[in-house]
Every structure is written in C-alpha cells, then in structure tokens.
Image (cartoon, rainbow, N blue to C red):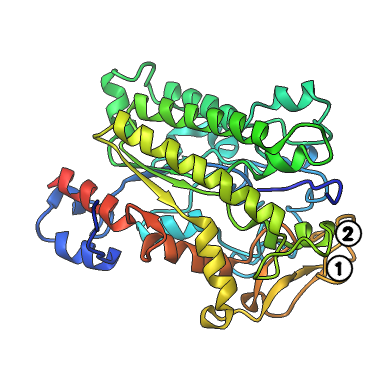
Amino acid sequence: MVSHFTSHHSHQFIFITLTTIFILTSSSSSAATETHPSRPFKKIYAFGDSFTDTGNTKTATGPTGFGHVSNPPYGTTFFHHPTNRYSDGRLVIDFVAETLSLPYLPPYRKIRAKVSSSTFGVNFAVAGATAINHAFFVKNNLSLDVTPESIQTQLLWFNKYLESQGCKNASASDCKEVFDDALFWVGEIGVNDYAYAVGSSIPDDTIRKLGIASFTGVLQSLLEKGAKYVVVQGLPLSGCLPLAMSLAAEDDRDNIGCVKSVNNQSYIHNAVLQAKLEELRKQFPNAVITYADYWNAYRTVMKSPSQYGFKELFSCCCGKGEPYNFDVFTTCGMANVSACANPSKYINWDGVHLTEAMYKVVSNMFLNGTFSHPPFSYLLGRKIKQCG
C-alpha cells in the first residue's frame, strides 16, 4: 500500500499451531511431505499493493513521494541492501513463505522472461495498486502520478503466467499443476483508492462499492479457475500511519490516538468485504477462503505495544520532519534522509509502510494466532487432509 494523501482532509475451530500440524502429519501424509517435511503447499501466488510487493515496482512509474525504494536504507535489516520492498526487511508474504518452507516469491516483472524458474510461485502485487481499475481515476482527473496497475492488472498478469505454463483454460490438464498445492495470498488493497480520491467530490461509499466489486470479481475469477486455498487480508489501521497522522486535523483522533475518520473508513470497508467473502464461501463450498484481520491485529499491537517489543507507535524510523519524523516531500531513500538505529522498536518504517518487526508480529497473528477467520490452521488442515 503506497498512499497519496494530497490534502488534510457456528463453528468454533480448535486452534492448532502450524508446527503441531506439521508434526501430526509428517508420518501420515507422504504426499504432503515427500519433497519437504513441512511443505503442505508447493507454491504461493500473491496479489496486493506495496505491503505485499516484493519488487514489481518500477521506480520511474512508482508512486509519488515513495519512488526511492531502490535506495538505501530500504532493505537494511534483513537483506542488507534494497530489494524494492517498501520496508527495512521482510514483509508479511516473506514470513508466510518462510513458515511454509518455501523460497521468497519472485516478482512477476522479474521472472517474465524466464517463467519456468518460478517453481514455487509468483508475486503479482505492485506498489500503488488500486482495487478499482486505473481508468476510473483517469476519467475523474485523479490519476496524478499514480501507479497504473490495479488488482485487475494483476489478474491479467496471472492469466499471462498461466498461458506461459501451458494453461490456456481452467479445465485443461496443464492447469492442474498450476493450481494444485497452491496457496493464493491476496494482500490488502484498497487504501490507495481512498487516498487518490481525497479532496475530490467522490464519496467514500462510491470508492468502497466500486473497489470491493472489482476486488471480489478478481477473487471469483481465481476461484473459478481452480484456486482452492485463499487468504484475503483486510485493510490495516491506515489512520495510524504517520502520513495520515500528519495530514489530518488534530481533533480527528480515536481512542488509540490515530486518525478516527481514516480508521473508520478502513473498518467499514473490511465489514463489507467480509460479507462478500461469506457469499463467495457459499458459492465455492469446496474452497477455503480465510480472512486475515489486519485491522484488529494492528489495533491489538497499538493497545499493548511493549508486549510486542515496540516503543515508537507513530514516529517513522526512516524519515525527516516533525512531529512524526515524516515529511511527505522528504521521504526515506532520499540522500539527506537517514534511518533510526533500531527499527525493531518502531512500528512504522517510512511513514506509509511498516517495519520488518511489525510485519513479523502481524504475520504471526495471521498464521499462528486468532486473527484469521477461519484460522490458518484450519486451512492447512484441509489442505493436508486432501493430500492424505
């Protein structure tokens, strides 16, 4: 998620950890373990915005204000060099890959020339991407210098990838190899849509309606093609990001000190999205569609930061300016902007994106905690049962 704010403005599942599942199944399911003792999925396909993008951004067309992702100190914590990830290190999708004993996902733009090398999956997420088609923003004079890719663009990229694998229609036998044993991880997308519309006459409910319709249309297409295991991340607490905090009116705050209007916007969006996911579950009863609750996971950290090792809730680690070490015109990656000594104590990295430490905490909440519905352990159990 790269935002551009330009003005101020029933079942109860028994929880089982991943480790336990792997141990329980290591002897009972040879299909799940013949290539790796803890690899229930053989590949991951990822979609989303800059919170999930592992390198599809092209700096020349990248989002205004955050076009310096290819410069240090991006990537400093884990990779020790910039990787075009909008963080000091790994993202949620990287921790997902690690947990499933898979390599980090290559960005689609990097593997197009040699798609056969993407044995373990592909990342189609791109920074600045929207849920609504880019043409909508152009038509309404909201295009500015925004990324032209949307979630629909990512679906087109996925379709091209399928063709490169010999999968030209969903019923083809070649498609079985692409979809079987694959986890579809759909990162949050939609915050940019609201951000691009700030200051315009387009109401939030129009953005929400169009964005969720586009997003669920893409999900439906993936499910129709053969996706069986899907994780969908909701929008995070966007109102807690330094960018939102610095641009919103000072009296627009909620009970955790973040921008109330922006957090409410994300909350309502997520509520509508969850209702749509429930409809898709009924439409595709053989698929497992898990909702990863980014909003409440983030909020939980904000309410008890020290429990998760954080000291700085609002200031960004890499930036310049007051009061949040952030200035929209002087951002991380620019020559005169430095990073803090210990990013692991910070939730925010560059004012819009999070630190590796925060991504790690959140990913653990999704994969091993109670912030996925149904739990990720349930999805894994279904997958392993299928293999057995």
Percent x, y of residue 343: 66, 74
Residue under label 2, please give it. 330
What residue type is disc 2 on? Thr
Dividing the picture into quadrants, the one containing residue 241 is: bottom right
Identify the residue at image location x=57%, y=33%.
151
Q: Secondary structure at mark 1?
A: loop
Q: Nearer the viewer, residue 174 or 23?
A: 23
Residue 315 against residue 143 in the figure, above or below: below
Dividing the picture into quadrants, the one containing residue 87 is: bottom right
Q: Nearer the viewer, residue 275 or 22?
A: 275
Q: Secondary structure at mark 2?
A: loop
Q: Are marks 1 and 2 in contact (CB under 8 Å)?
A: yes
Report whether 8 appears left or right of 156. Answer: right
Percent x, y of residue 84: 67, 51
Percent x, y of residue 303: 57, 74
Percent x, y of residue 358: 57, 68
Dividing the picture into quadrants, the one containing residue 128 is: top right
Residue under label 1, please give it. 320
Residue 182 against residue 139 in the figure, above or below: below
